Amino acid sequence: MKVDTLIIGSGVVATALTKRLLEHKPNMTILILEAGQRYKTKDFGIWENFQVTGDYPYPQMFDLPYPERDKPGENRLVGEGAQIPTAFTLNGGRALAYGGSTNIWGGWTFRRKPEDFYLKTLTGHALDWPFDYDTLEPYYCQAEDYLAVSGDSKVQDPPRSKPYPFHEFPYSYVDQPVGKAMAKLGISYDHLPIARRGVSAIPSKHAPCQVTGTCDYCPFGARFVAADYMDDLRKWHDYPNLEIRLGVVVMSIRMATKRRAAGVVCRDTATGDQYTIDADRVIVAAGTFESPKLLLRSRSREWPNGVGNDSDNVGRYLITHPYMIYAGSLPENPDKMQWELNFPTLVSRYFDTPKEQAKGKFVLVNAPNIEAQSIAQMMQAGYSNAKINRVITGAVPISLHGMVEIFGQYENRVTNLDKTNHFGMPESVIHFTPDRAALERIQEIGKVVKRIFEQMGGTYADGNPSVNSWRCDHAASTCRMSKDPKDGVVDGDLRVHGTDNLYLCGNAVYPNLGSINPTDTVTALAFRLGDHLNAAG
Amino acid sequence: MYETKARHPLSPPTPDPLPQTVYESMWSMFLAIGEMWLLKDDPQPYRLRFRTFLENRIALHPLYAGYYLSTALLIDDLTAQADADAAWQLIFFNRNPLNLEFNPSLLEAVQTHVADEFIARRVALGSFADFGAEAYQGYMAAGANLRNEPPHYRKAEGLK
């Protein structure tokens, strides 16, 4: 079998890129290979199950937890990070399925700021990006249209040339004490841009958000999930040569010469059959862990250490965000303030500035804390009406969630384990030792949050913060972009250094992450790659 | 995801479809939630959606037909022994069923798979408003985020 373009992975990168390529050349043969399976979206029965049980609907998409005594588990975490229970928890942290991790994402869609493209120049950390904010800005606009982002178009930090496709969600009542306290302290805040489709004059097959607060499984498809948009390409367009194969693991990339990829060797997990596919170009879009692992597995006489790995950068400089939860409480809640909207509407990027860059920029989000006041859970526990009202009007838990920029270290990396997981994919070894300075930074941010809580009239909890996870869905930098091949894995056009027709797109190519969620940027990169490939012919 | 073949070997045989009396019994339990917690919302508008909810639960997990049938039988037994109010008190508020004279696992199953789910559904359908909120996780009647329209949740005042 021979195709024009072979894409490995079916997440947002594959979806946006495929759209861009087929808009340009509708008859192009594109084959997308996905190791996972399809899960049903927008199903009312599954949504009701999630609503009444709280059971997360996606366990089949997840890696097993790391091995423990008496539990074989999957993957390995080594280094000092292995002592941190929430470090790089692949289980629940990424989705191996049609549509990728957009099945489980929260939809926070921030742009990087101009200084984030010059981290090396400004601080000495990591690398600069091979291009600047202005180069990516038009693609951010396209990404936000595609992801259906609701945001405040008046916010011009970073600058934007087009408004968001949908207007911002008004601040919710729980933002009131936080916003007022921040204002008194001189800490700016804004509406949080979020991928929830709104209403506009532009026709869409996708329904608008109905603010059900059950976004982990949207019954309408108002939260962007790449699977729904890939389905659009298949069902509603005349793209006769687009094919998606599920349950197919790519074992290696075949190189015809040092510079030219010939195709891939893959395995059907249902039958166990191994076969080859030829392609004019190969795009690796398999995520921050699987993309470098595939390059490392693709050894040949020309590439003895794996494709693109002559400088030993593949899989290295693994970074992510520690997701911090700073908890506290207010002494009373006479207005019965509750989390009526189960997604955040307020973010402060006040500390996401050049001034903070050397120590690690951070953002603070007033994010949902619904369980503490769940009326249903109190009723299920046998609380009477009067007792529930006493709980709601009494001391109320508060929290601010934070993400901080972490700088890459050569030793932190991902490699292949000679063992197969329950999807039929090679397992991962994650080598991770947190930077001491980063751990100190996390504590330092707590001092800012403490001031905010005290300004609110609340208290700051002992033992803050809890690091909810070192997030696998924000993991990045394992195949970073670089101008010089000795510093990275791909060039500014996302082509693997030293090759002509092998590309890689995903968070893996980020030289640094900044303090914000990566999906807006990776979608912009996918559209930019599409334009590059279309221009290349 | 949908379990198309699952049926526990120890489950009692369940008629397909369930008799109307079972649906009526489930509806009576749903109504009792309002009585037990002194909820002020009118449940009648929820009736059609509640019936659909039961059917969806069975379609997703076929074991639910057995849960609903067993629950109806338990309600009948408890009501015959004392009265309906005592039955609801036991089901909704006795969370330590080990001291019962009959099989506690039946009551636990009814509480977990039926009563607790009905509570979650009832609150999300609108009863949350009794506790001061204007929206809640799973509330469907809110509507979209329209410019120049007030949001369907309590908005912060005094922020920029």
Image (cartoon, coloured by chain):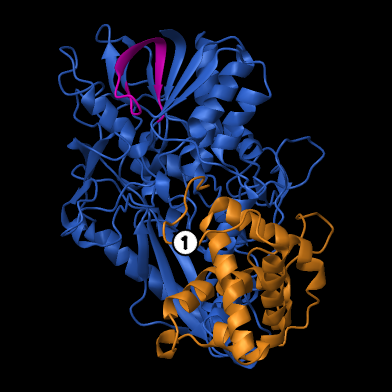
Chain colours: A blue, B orange
Residue A188 falls within the magenta-colored stretch: no
Give the residue at mark 1.
B11
Q: Residue A466 location, x and y as percent?
A: 36, 70
Name above or below for residue A203 compared with residue B59: above
In this view, the residue in front, A185 or A200, is A200
- Residue A317 is drawn in which quadrant? top left
Q: Does residue A25 appear left or right of residue B50 in this picture?
A: left
> Splitting the image into 4 quarters, where does residue A221 fall?
top right
Region in magenta: A267-285
Which is nearer the eye, A319 or A469?
A469
**Looking at the image, is A384 positioned above or below residue A214?**
below
The image shows residue A187, relative to residue B76, as above or below, that is above
User: How many C-alpha atoms fall within 10 Å of the one at disc 1: few (<14), some, or many (≥20)?
Assistant: few
x and y percentages locating residue A493 in the rendered image: 43, 22
Q: Residue B78, percent across and down?
A: 59, 85
Q: Residue at x 27, y 26 (%)?
A: A295
SS under mark 1: loop
What's the residue type where badge 1 is placed?
A: Ser
Judging depth in this view, the residue of A500 and A129 nearest the camera is A500
On the question of residue B151 being in view, the answer is: no
Q: Nearer the viewer, residue B138 or A326?
A: B138
The residue lying at 51 percent from left, 35 percent from top is A12
**Above or below, B72 relative to A492:** below
Does the stretch in magenta take in A272?
yes
Predominant SS along the magenta part:
strand
